[in-house]
Image (spheres, grey):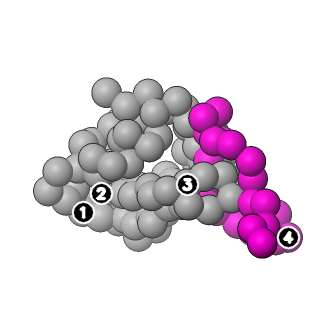
Amino acid sequence: MTNFTLTPKAHRFMRMMVMTDGGPGAGFRLAVSPGGCSGLSADISVLAEPQQGDAVVTRDGLKIFLPAESRLLLEGVTVDFADTPTSTGLVFHDPKATACCTPSH
């Protein structure tokens, strides 16, 4: 079982997306890959059913579809939602991540 934390803001964002874009039984697919400022970047979608190999994690009635790589990358991570002038979307707080977005020369 994947051990990650979902903040109330992230849960509300995911639930609203599923309610808007999905039918009965739909879920939120969270495909996470290495990269981005927090060390992770996400490809999100609302699907009627999980794709092959996806695990289904249910949090407070919300179905989240997680591919195998995402389950590994989300271990110990807090998934939050940010709505700021510069960005809107899911934010990942990974205690294992190192420095954030330092330009390389």
Q: Residue furthest front?
A: 105
Callouts 1 and 2 close, C-beta under 8 Å: yes
Q: Amino acid at mark 1?
A: Ala
| Cα distance between the residues tagged 4 and 3 | 21 Å
Lateral position of residue 25 relative to residue 53, left or right = right
Give the magenta-colored segment's residue range.
Answer: 84-105
Q: According to the image, label 2 marks what residue?
A: 26
Q: Amino acid at mark 4?
A: Pro
Query: Helix or strand or loop: what does disc 2 sit on?
Result: loop
4 or 1: tag closer to the N-terminus? 1
Give the number of the mark in front: 3 or 2.
3
- The residue positioned 40% from the left and 67% from the top of the image is 45
The vertical placement of 74 against 102, above or below, is above
Q: Residue furthest left?
A: 52
Q: Which image quarter holds the N terminus?
A: top left
Q: According to the image, label 4 marks what residue?
A: 85
Query: Helix or strand or loop: what does disc 3 sit on?
Result: strand
Instruction: From the top left corner, tell me how far across and down residue 4 is, in percent.
Output: 49, 32
